[in-house]
């Protein structure tokens, strides 16, 4: 990360000027324009009511799109302001109590500073512009656990009204010849080089606030003041400047949206079944395509994992006291909290179902959130989903190859 000092008043002594450290991945041209606007705002005395008289230097801490904002906020020399970046980062930071209340944005610790859309963009060798994406369109994407753009693109169908169909589309996309990228921006770079046909990217059109096609989803970027920043007064002045320019919109409320915990569980699910098991997944797609993609096996391939997980269902199969003891022992190992453990056993004894949005929300709310906050449960669940996916993809390869031999 590059640290650049840009003074907000020409001719002032750099050592005498106050500072606000602003971490952002916005490009240089936009940063320079913002400095000019901040200079004019200060010169007009607009920030005097906040004690913001005189020059304030903006120290730009320039981030890569894939830099971890949560880790940045934990640093002893953390910046004063986070500017731009996925709304998911700001939701996580707000939930962990690392953000200070924002001025002029009532009852909020972060606000929306820019809106856009996540769209699927084509490689130059396919054609310029964007195109609708159906179930058979090859789309390269990156690990949703680390790439907010891929996460947003996946959330559109999965947390809409058709979870199973959205999951099937992602299983198909994960089988592309390139595979799932391991870092933010890898898929988009592959498209630019002509190594992949399509990838989700963020497009910023002024005034864009909602998705206009089924293959597009809204993208929100935020701004927040970190509690650990050393220059609070200057940070407040910077945020008031943004508000005065009409740049800020209150962060969206929870109405109709998936909870943060459910979205993080969804990222775990996709990482386990599409990324950690992608060798078996890609091999299964090769076998399927080579043998005409039989409908039954194709359906197996694209089904979400079951609940209870396959290993738990196997333990419960004898339906006797010994089976119950094994299940209760397992629940105690992955969920030491008594309330979470009791909820988990009851859920496992309920009728089997497939993972969907409602189930992810139930897991997120179980025992007032104690279950999903338990690291042992999360680790166990990720391992279960990965093992199930690998076995499922191997079974598809084995059955299809055997039926055609």
Image: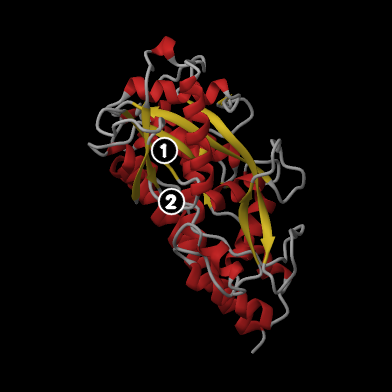
* In the depicted structure, whether residue 294 falls above or below residue 266: below
- Looking at the rendered structure, the number of numbered marks drawn on it comes to 2
* In the depicted structure, whether residue 191 falls above or below residue 289: above
Is residue 61 in view? yes
Residue 125 image position (x, y, % from top left): 70, 74
Q: Quadrant of the C terminus?
A: bottom right
Of the pair 306 and 170, the residue shown nearer to us? 170
Q: What's the residue at 33%, 30% (across, down)?
A: 12
Residue 40 image position (x, y, % from top left): 51, 26
Q: What's the residue at 45%, 16% (across, down)?
A: 47
* The furthest residue to the bottom: 405
Of the pair 384 and 157, the residue shown nearer to us? 157
- SS label for mark 2: helix
Is residue 350 in view? no
- SS label for mark 1: helix
Q: Quadrant of residue 117?
A: top right
The dot on residue 210 is: none
Q: What's the residue at 48%, 73% (across, down)?
A: 279
The dot on residue 312 is: 2
Q: Quadrant of residue 77?
A: top left
In the visual, does 47 lie left or right of 302? left
In the visual, does 175 lie left or right of 21? right
Q: Where does label 1 land, which residue? A: 345
Residue 72 image position (x, y, % from top left): 32, 42
Earlier in the chain: of badge 1 and badge 2, it is 2
């Amino acid at each position: 990360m590059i640290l650049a000092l840009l003074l907000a008043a020409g001719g002032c002594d750099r050592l005498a000027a106050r500072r606000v450290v602003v971490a952002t991945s916005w490009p240089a041209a936009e940063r320079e324009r913002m400095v000019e606007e901040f200079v004019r705002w200060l010169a007009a005395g607009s920030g005097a009511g906040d004690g913001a008289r005189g020059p304030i230097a903006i120290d730009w801490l320039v981030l890569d799109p894939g830099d971890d904002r949560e880790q940045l906020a934990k640093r002893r020399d953390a910046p004063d302001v986070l500017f731009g970046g996925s709304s998911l980062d700001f939701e996580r930071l707000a939930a962990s109590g690392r953000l200070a209340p924002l001025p002029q944005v009532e009852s909020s610790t972060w606000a929306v500073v820019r809106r856009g859309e996540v769209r699927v963009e084509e490689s130059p060798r396919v054609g310029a512009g964007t195109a609708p994406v159906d179930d058979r369109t090859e789309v390269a994407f990156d690990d949703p656990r680390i790439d907010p753009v891929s996460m947003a693109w996946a959330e559109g169908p999965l947390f809409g009204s058709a979870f199973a169909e959205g999951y099937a589309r992602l299983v198909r996309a994960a089988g592309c010849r390139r595979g799932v990228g391991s870092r933010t921006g890898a898929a988009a770079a592959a498209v630019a080089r002509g190594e992949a046909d399509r990838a989700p990217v963020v497009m910023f059109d002024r005034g864009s606030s909602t998705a206009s096609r089924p293959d597009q989803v809204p993208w929100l970027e935020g701004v927040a003041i970190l509690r650990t920043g050393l220059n609070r007064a200057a940070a407040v002045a910077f945020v008031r400047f943004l508000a005065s320019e009409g740049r800020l919109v209150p962060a969206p409320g929870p109405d109709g949206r998936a909870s943060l915990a459910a979205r993080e569980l969804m990222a775990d699910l996709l990482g386990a079944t599409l990324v950690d098991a992608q060798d078996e997944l890609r091999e299964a797609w090769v076998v399927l395509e080579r043998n005409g993609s039989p409908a039954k096996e194709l359906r197996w391939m694209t089904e979400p994992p079951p609940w209870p997980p396959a290993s738990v269902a196997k333990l419960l199969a004898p339906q006797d006291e010994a089976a119950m003891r094994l299940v209760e022992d397992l629940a105690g190992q992955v969920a030491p909290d008594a309330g979470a453990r009791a909820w988990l056993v009851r859920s496992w004894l309920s009728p089997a179902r497939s993972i969907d949005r409602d189930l992810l929300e139930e897991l997120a709310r179980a025992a007032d959130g104690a279950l999903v906050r338990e690291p042992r449960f999360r680790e166990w669940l990720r391992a279960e989903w990965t093992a199930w996916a690998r076995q499922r993809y191997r079974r598809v390869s084995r059955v299809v190859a055997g039926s055609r031999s």
